[in-house]
Image: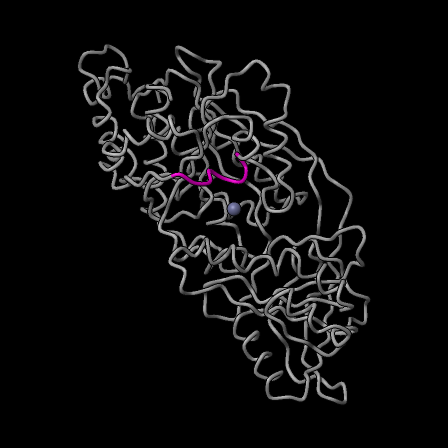
Amino acid sequence: MRNHAPYLTLLLCAGCLSTACSGTPPDSVARALIRAGFPKNTAFTLLKELTEQAGHRLSGSAGSLKALDVTQQMMRQAGLTHVRVESVMVPHWERGTVEEAVLLDAGGRRISPLSVCALGGSVGTPIRGITADVVEVQSFDQLRALGKSAVGKIVFFNRPMDPTRLDPFNAYGGAVDQRGRGAVEAARAGGVAAIVRSVTTARDNVPHTGAMGYVDSVRRVPAVAIGIEDADRLSALITRGPTPRVRIRLDCRVLPDAPSGNALGELTGSEFPDQIIVVGGHIDAWDKGTGAHDDGAGCVQAIEALRLLREIGVRPRRTLRAVMFMNEENGLRGGRGYAASPNRDSETPIAALESDRGGFAPRGFSVQADSATFTRVRQWQSLLELLDAGKVETGHGGVDITPIVDKGTPGFGLLVDRQRYFDYHHSANDTLDKVHPRELEHGAIVMAFLLYLISEQGL
Ligand SMILES: [Zn+2]
């Protein structure tokens, strides 16, 4: 949008003849970003397009490849250059069409369905399903203590997220082991399948999927997530007795690895084009909803942040590169592939920023870097407060950028209002209508501003 430049000359930088330059006061840039971003909320328009055109985009799916096309087109329209895909191979798991669990009476007759979905990576069941009594536990220790009484049973892991933890991300971390390792631990105990209480803060009956794993030395048993209301109902039945019997049927399956990739686009640095500042999210998403918060939001915010900077006339000193990382949810092949690519050999990484905590109102940034870098970033706190996002704390940058950060590059994660993310995360409720256009845009504005500060001032 080169035709905006004359206007921006006045808007941003009275002393500069063309566009915003390193002499432009940062507070002017912050105000220009607000003026450019909020009237249009373009990030939401992009998210609508992504979720409508490539709603189901689990790695290896046709939708995931479509998402690469859609986001490349968005980057071109935003005026980014060097728009391309860097190839990676990804795991390919398909949910299939049969996905059910039913409560049975003692005679094997159907009492009622349970709200379940397969966990990502689960093996399927035989066509007739797996039918067994259910045993409930809150922990792996409790399961081991059951000894032989778990043999031949469906193991029901029912430890909830701890609601007394202020940060739901911490509560999630305290419960998600059941999803990740439940199938392995159930099989070790002699169980035939696993049912896992959905790892969510919602109070509804929608099941939440997510990655689970197997180990080669342990028999592979199927695993499902169950909605919270049915988890409580099942638990009440077990307490009351007699032991409920459940039949699970799944036709999900693992296919050979599939070709895929990360989509990239850039604003090339005017002074240091080989110095790279990455901004991204993950383009793959679980297949129950449309991945609006997780992580369509982060992807479109990365594109929108660069589009905003271009619109207000910023020509960054260092290269700003948007990356749509593939396969965060069940493999991290995109993040690893990006960092390991020979294309990185001629580049100097400066920083990597990820948005993957949902498209909620921004609060600031987590910083994953040495103390000197953290101190430097802390000095920008008062500037970030101009955008009502002045929180700067040490912490995890993001899963996709971890392979970059592990090589010594400072990592940044957008911090947001955390309370609702796990209501929607990995479920059929992660859809566009749960995203607030202004909050989403606010995040993109704050990201753009941090990118500007890093690009102009360095770290
Ligand atoms: Zn995510």
Drawn side of residue 171 relative to residue 27, left or right: right
Q: Is residue 362 visible?
A: yes
Q: Look at the magenta stretch and give its main secondary structure.
A: loop
Q: Is residue 318 left or right of residue 329?
A: left
Type of colouring = one colour
Residue beneath the point at 33% across and 40% down: 364
2 above or below 290?
above
For the record, the magenta segment spans 394-401
Decide: is 208 above or below 363. below
Q: Quadrant of the N terminus?
A: top left
Left or right, 153 with respect to 377, comes to right
Q: Is residue 173 above or below residue 382?
A: below
Residue 103 appears in which quarter of the rendering?
A: bottom right
Q: Is residue 435 found inside the magenta-colored segment of the image?
A: no
Q: Is residue 397 magenta?
A: yes
Frontmost residue, 397 versus 225: 397
